[in-house]
Image (cartoon, rainbow, N blue to C red):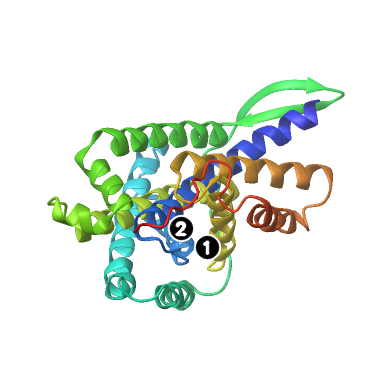
Amino acid sequence: MAYFLQQLINGLTLGMIYGLIAIGYTMVYGIIGMINFAHGEIYMIAAFLSIIVFTILGAAGITFVPLALVIVLIVAMFFTACYGWTLERVAYRPLRGAPRLAPLISAIGMSIFLQNYVQLLQGARVRPLQPIIQGGFSVFEQNDFVVQLSYIQIFIWILTLVLMTGFALLIARTSLGRAQRACEQDQKMAGLLGIDVDRTISLTFVMGASLAAVAGVMVTLYYGVVDFFIGFLAGMKAFTAAVLGGIGSLPGAMLGGLILGLVEAFWSGYFTTEYKDVAAFSILVLVLIFRPTGLLGRPEVEKV
């Protein structure tokens, strides 16, 4: 029971990180109907930015942890939002009316470009970060096994829930959210009704990149190491989470992320960590075979 509870805590933490990244995939797909395969690299850039900013703050003598965290989050979200906006303008907007294969190839090309760009700037070696948030609670004990809930896990849970609540309110109650939902339904009609479609799509990329930035900062704090390749694997898993939950559905993206995180944690805990990625991608294959619309997805209706 204690071991099960520990894996549950670990899985929920990992799942929330996947969920935040998956929302970026599902928003872009929901509005322009394409998969942004460079989204994982935005998350990787945020992870590197967090290490750089923490290092600068440490050198400047700013060691008060809450202040440092706020500064790192703001800087990471700002710069990754710029990357997201640039990505949309350079790689996707010129191909918006092209056949679907063209933006797909462009997305893969941008993913490879960003990986090599970071590798050239930061090197191929793993970059470590000293633990910033330490300590935690002992929540349960059984047969000398103590279930730990760390402060960093609590921080990840609270920050994810706050962001998800704010994001849901933004989509449901603001003019930007209404514009996004209108563009999701029909871009031409949205344009005729006075909605700036280009601006709405650009802001969607910016919002997705900002959420990926938060995930990048959290994973750096949680694991303490980053490298230029983490974006590809995390991006593919977040894409799996988005498909599992129903790509195009925001609650589905978070649900898919949580399920994927739990599967990975329990697989690692009860079987082996070496094949946890196999378990994750097996889910993607099974979902695509038996339920291609995902758990909360809607069947695609051909517009005439």
Q: Residue at x 63, y 50 (%)?
A: 291
Task: Please provide percent x and percent y for residue 100.
Answer: 42, 72
Position of residue 281 relative to residue 261, above or below, is below
Q: Secondary structure at mark 1?
A: helix
- The quarter in which the C terminus is drawn is bottom left
- The quarter in which the N terminus is drawn is top right
Q: Quadrant of residue 113?
A: bottom left
Residue type indicated by callout 2:
Tyr
Q: Secondary structure at mark 2?
A: helix
Task: Please provide percent x and percent y for residue 192.
Answer: 14, 55
Q: Are marks 2 and 1 in contact (CB under 8 Å)?
A: yes
Q: Quadrant of residue 245?
A: top right
The furthest residue to the left: 194
The furthest residue to the right: 143
Task: Please provide percent x and percent y for residue 182.
Answer: 26, 47
- The disc, 2 or 1, on the residue closer to the chain's N-terminal end is 2
Position of residue 121 relative to residue 197, above or below, is below
* Depth order, front residue of 54/238: 238
- Please tell me the numbered disc located at residue 43: 2
What residue did someone put label 1 on? 231
For the residues labelled 2 and 1, the Cα–Cα distance comes to 6 Å
Badge 2: how crowded within 10 Å, few (<14), some, or many (20+)?
many
Task: Please provide percent x and percent y for residue 97.
Answer: 30, 73
> Would residue 50 be visible to someone looking at this image?
no
> Would residue 81 be visible to someone looking at this image?
yes
- Please tell me the numbered disc located at residue 40: none
Residue type indicated by callout 1:
Gly
Position of residue 232 relative to residue 300, above or below, is below
